[in-house]
Image (spheres, rainbow, N blue to C red):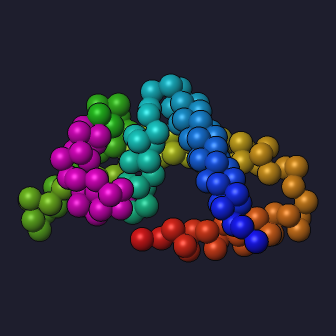
Amino acid sequence: MEQQPIKDKLNIQISEIYESLSRVEREAARKASSGQLSVSEMHTLEAIEKGRGRKMTEVAASLGVTISTLTIAVNRLVQKGLVERARTDSDRRVVQISLTGAGHGVVANHRRFRRQMLGEIINGLRSDELSFLSKILDKFQDLIQF
């Protein structure tokens, strides 16, 4: 059986899902921050939150960006009162960044809004369909890991 029509359809579906999820993500970032943050800034906050007092190099690596790119983003987030930076006592060259209370609040709002929107999206699926979708997405994620 010819698989090309199925592959073409999957290509379109994946592109459309990506675009839809990007719109959802933009809306979640906008609502969580009252229109003050971009999606990339929200991703930066989430990456910083994953560890208390994370080094700039760790956060940059987790986001797949250069230190200079992260520095620009962190400067904006510091100005917005969402991130704070500090030098370590053991090595003054090392900069650690962490979320402020306001930063934690924005990330919590973002997650809550994203969960709500996802809940609305998948609400129409039966339990067996959700289970099947989860297995397929696990497999898909395994296949696209680099």
Quarter holding residue 79 = top left
> What is the tally of numbered marks visible in this picture?
0
Quarter holding residue 133 = bottom right
Q: Main secondary structure of the magenta part?
A: helix
Q: Residue at x 18, y 47 (%)?
A: 68
Camera-side residue of 38 and 3: 3
Answer left or right for 117 relative to 146. Answer: right
Q: Is residue 31 visible?
A: yes
Answer left or right for 67 relative to 6. Answer: left
Spot the residue most to the left. 92
> Which quadrant is the C terminus positioned in?
bottom left
> Which quadrant is the N terminus positioned in?
bottom right
Q: Residue at x 44, y 34 (%)?
A: 38
Answer left or right for 126 relative to 63. Answer: right
Image location of residue 65, percent across then percent down: 28, 53
The answer to if 72 sits in the magenta stretch is: yes
Image location of residue 29, percent across then percent down: 53, 36
Image location of residue 96, percent across then percent down: 24, 57
* Above or below: residue 61 compared with residue 76: below
Image location of residue 52, percent across then percent down: 37, 61
The answer to if 145 sits in the magenta stretch is: no
Q: Which residues are magenta?
A: 52-75
* Above or below: residue 10 compared with residue 18: below
Q: Residue at x 33, y 43 (%)?
A: 83
Q: Is residue 32 visible?
A: no
Q: Residue at x 64, y 48 (%)?
A: 12
Camera-side residue of 26 and 46: 26
Spot the residue most to the top. 35
